[in-house]
Image (cartoon, grey):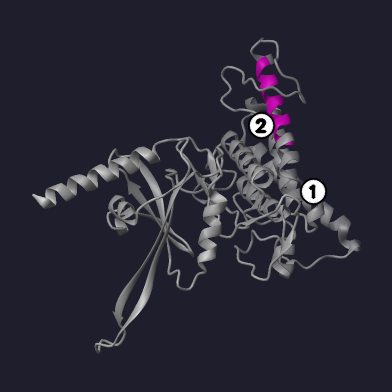
């Protein structure tokens, strides 16, 4: 009888937590470890969604069938607890369509008597559980969809993904003063409608209102996406994320992260005498991207798509400039993407014999009927 009462109490408690999680306006909350154990089937390998350098992500299934992602961090005896606290504080106020939604966390500590050598000599040791909970984004990460121009996603989808990543990064930089520092396709999750969501803030840095850069001794990250000034000198600024974004845009365009100068050892800086050669190399690279897409696209798709591809190629190339001062900011990138997007809407309107509502360079909050895309709104 007592066991039935306990089970009933547990179900009722779990139902309470689920109701709180389903409230879209709720602040991310501290969740009981027992609740997270229950919804992940005791962190079963069958519920594993993926793993990285800092933890394993599990699918948590709530009583109603709704799912969340539960990230259980690895041995925190070797990781500073400050890292966990910082990540939670960064995530608490973040709410944007293109950033994965943080819903809760768990921090549990307990002491256990451990027999170190099996001889009856016990010592007390602290065991710690640290978990982060997010919305479950069902379509895996962007790296699973990146392929060359001849196959995979159609251009319109690739273009919307670029716009979405730019919008999410703009929000992090301008509204949250956060530098992500590990932006890569594996950390961009795709939802059921292929909307990209930036995830994994384990390496992020937060800036004060007047800070523009900081210097760090530790330089974790993913080679190939790390900006040269961060890799070599430990300089952290929003331009480090812009560099990573450029590599991602190039991957979305071509299927690869290779571009002129990407293979230079330790980002060796070239002399001024080679500047013309460098410019020519990037020009050839851009033209090659356009030609490859031109061969794939049908003639009926017109020049607007090629203009979008050209703009994306130019932005990607600008983002991977060696000198961070020459890289664009997200506001500039979004404006350029919006301009060519508005051009596309105007052309479609003209073709349908409807007077165009928008002209190039004009902004509107109204999306025309039949166009599922929207203009990115800047703060």
Residue farthest along the bottom direction in this orientation = 119
User: What is the C-alpha distance between the residues marked 2 and 1?
Assistant: 31 Å
Q: Residue at x 64, y 61 (%)?
A: 224
Label drawn at residue 377: 2
Q: Main secondary structure of the magenta part?
A: helix
Q: Position of residue 329 (x, y in %)?
A: 75, 45
Is the residue marked by circle 2 packed among few (<14), some (14-19), or many (20+) residues within 10 Å?
Answer: few
Q: Residue at x 69, y 20 (%)?
A: 347
Part of the protein shown in magenta: 336-349
Residue placed most toward the observer, 108 or 349:
108
Q: Label 1: state its secondary structure.
A: helix
In this rendering, which labeled residue sits more in front, label 2 or label 1?
2
Q: Quadrant of residue 353?
A: top right
Q: Quadrant of residue 298?
A: top right
Is the residue marked by circle 1 packed among few (<14), some (14-19), or many (20+) residues within 10 Å?
Answer: some
Residue placed most toward the observer, 277 or 330:
330
The residue that label 1 is drawn on is 283
């Amino acid at each position: 009888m007592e066991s039935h009462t306990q089970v009933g109490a547990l179900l009722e408690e779990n139902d309470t937590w689920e109701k709180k999680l389903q409230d879209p306006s709720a602040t991310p909350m501290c969740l009981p470890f027992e609740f997270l154990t229950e919804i992940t089937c005791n962190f079963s390998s069958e519920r594993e969604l993926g793993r990285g350098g800092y933890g394993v992500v599990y699918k948590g299934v709530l009583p109603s069938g709704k799912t969340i992602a539960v990230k259980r961090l690895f041995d925190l005896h070797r990781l500073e607890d400050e890292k966990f606290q910082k990540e939670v504080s960064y995530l608490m106020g973040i709410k944007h369509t293109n950033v994965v939604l943080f819903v809760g966390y768990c921090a549990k500590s307990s002491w256990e008597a451990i027999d170190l050598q099996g001889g009856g000599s016990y010592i007390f040791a602290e065991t710690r559980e640290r978990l982060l909970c997010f919305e479950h984004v069902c379509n895996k990460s962007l790296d699973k969809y990146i392929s060359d121009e001849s196959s995979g996603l159609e251009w319109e989808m690739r273009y919307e993904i670029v716009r979405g990543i730019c919008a999410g990064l703009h929000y992090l930089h301008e509204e949250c003063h956060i530098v992500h520092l590990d932006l890569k396709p594996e950390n961009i999750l795709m939802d059921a409608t292929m909307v990209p969501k930036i995830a994994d803030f384990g390496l992020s840095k937060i800036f004060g209102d007047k800070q523009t850069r900081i210097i760090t001794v530790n330089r974790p990250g993913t080679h190939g996406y790390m900006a040269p000034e961060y890799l070599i000198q430990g300089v952290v600024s929003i331009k480090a994320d812009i560099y990573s974004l450029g590599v991602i845009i190039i991957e979305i365009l071509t299927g690869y992260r290779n571009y002129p100068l990407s293979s230079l050892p330790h980002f060796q800086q070239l002399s001024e005498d080679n500047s013309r050669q460098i410019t020519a190399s990037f020009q050839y690279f851009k033209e090659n991207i356009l030609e490859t897409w031109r061969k794939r696209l049908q003639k009926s798709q017109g020049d607007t798509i090629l203009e979008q591809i050209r703009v994306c190629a130019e932005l990607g190339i600008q983002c991977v400039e060696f000198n961070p001062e020459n890289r664009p900011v997200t506001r500039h990138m979004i404006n350029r993407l919006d301009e060519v997007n508005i051009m596309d809407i105007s052309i479609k309107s003209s073709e349908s014999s409807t007077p165009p509502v928008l002209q190039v360079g004009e902004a509107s909050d109204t999306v025309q009927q039949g166009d599922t895309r929207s203009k990115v709104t800047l703060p």
